[in-house]
Amino acid sequence: MNYSGKKIAIVGAVRSGIGAAKLIKKLKGIPFVSDSSDNEKIRKSVDVLNALDINYEVGGHTSRVYESEAMVVSPGVPQNTEIIKTARDKKIKLISELELASSVCKGNIIAITGTNGKTTTTSLCGHVFNGCGGKTYTAGNIGLAFSEIALDVKENEFAAVEVSSFQLDLIDKFKPKVAVILNITPDHLNRYENNYQNYINSKMKIFENQDGKDYLIINRDNDVIMNSLTKHSSTDYYFSLNTESKNGCFLSGAEIIFLKNDKEEFRCSLSDINLRGEHNYANAMAVIIAAKIFGLDNEKIIEGLRTFKGVEHRLEFVREINGVKYINDSKATNVDSVWYALRSFDQSIYLILGGQDKGNDYNQIRDLVLGKVKKIYAIGSSAEKVFNFFHHDVKVEIKQSLEDVIAAVNSEARENEIVLLSPACASFDMFNDYEHRGKVFKEAVNNL
């Protein structure tokens, strides 16, 4: 689409919406931003829009939003909202911010999706690729919106993009050079009308436009992915902790091996990976495959794996006090993430659970909680649900804030025990986002 001189509405005035508005203006279009909210977060966006001389409205949508030739929809806007329904009725073309950004990006797009591990894998990909000399930008759900950097990525450079199901819902021609599907487990069921298949279908759209010159990297250990694969043209590579593959990565003892056409092209030790947990070995495999697709140097790949420090809010060590370790896993916004987090520690755990529930089924972690968790602190709007599910199995106490939790656990936890914030829920009932939640947790810990 040629955006020059055309009126383009952008629904949503936070990160991706602001990025889309900036991009439309750079493309000589006429952006108009509309957001139904009018909170502190939106106020910061308003300052940016004013500085850029971009028209906007907040606190509600007026008829102005429909005076456009296309509408860019931010991923946080559900497809069943009135504004989207009306736009469809008016035959206004709906575009995802991901679609917009990818349409003008000249570099190689490595799109990474999955229920868990997207941020870690995207960050690791950027770190490894840059260490190998391949100029790489990381964007999407991580840091900057893709539309903020899309025009900066030159031919033969790379954009490692974290992609959510919400961003994939409205794609049309989105076609990454490399698509990665890390895993699929139940999440966001509140957004998908409690229909797990709808969520799966959104994730699987990531490769629907790929052709024979593109690549698809998939987790062979995830039955949902393997059972949902449809006919496609791209070249497949697999990664697995359990099964050897002629094209892909697999675990052999304490080593990771990559084969291409049944020929070994890469090998490293698990000790070369500076991240803990089997799930991170799987994430590293996906990055190794992507790196080998582009022929990157083996020693430099290994150096990147060794020097990667992890990402903030994902099993992040905060502080040790009197032998008690405080771990910030605020990015764990679903039950599957908590399952991985609990498996990462051998010590007794004080677990902080709760927030804005997304249709969670806690049966998945019940056995791990019974075996590892000494006490649960329940917070947020789902605190009562957490209490009702677990209080027969383990001590559960409802708290009104993270500060209250830290004050209580500071007097209860003993040497060689873990205090783990791994909420299994969205954060919007109490915080701006998971990053805000993690920062509040860290401040409370560091104030002890």
Image (spheres, grey):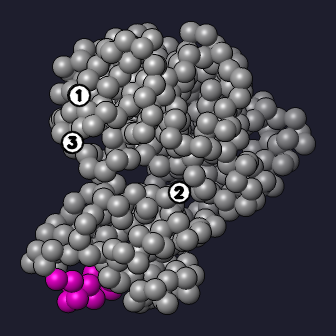
Question: What residue is drawn where x is 46% and y is 19%?
Answer: 247
Q: Quadrant of residue 324?
A: bottom left
Q: Which span is picked out in magenta? A: 404-414
Q: Residue furthest left?
A: 322
Query: Mark 2 to mark 3: distance in Å?
Result: 38 Å
Q: Write the residue at 68% across / 25% down.
A: 208
What residue is drawn where x is 61% and y is 21%?
175
| 108 up-or-down from 113: above or below | above
Disc 1 + disc 3, Cβ < 8 Å: no
- Main SS, magenta region, reads helix
Q: Earlier in the sequence, mark 1 or mark 3?
A: 1
Q: Classify 10 Å Cα crowding around label 3: few (below 14), some (14-19), many (20 and above).
A: some
**In this figure, which residue is indicated by the disc labeled 2?**
42
| Secondary element at image label 1 | strand
The answer to whether mark 2 and mark 3 are in CB contact below 8 A is no
Locate residue 443: give its quadrant. Answer: bottom left
**Residue type pointed to by label 3:** Asn
Q: Is disc 3 placed on a helix, strand or loop?
A: loop
Q: What residue is disc 3 on?
A: 274
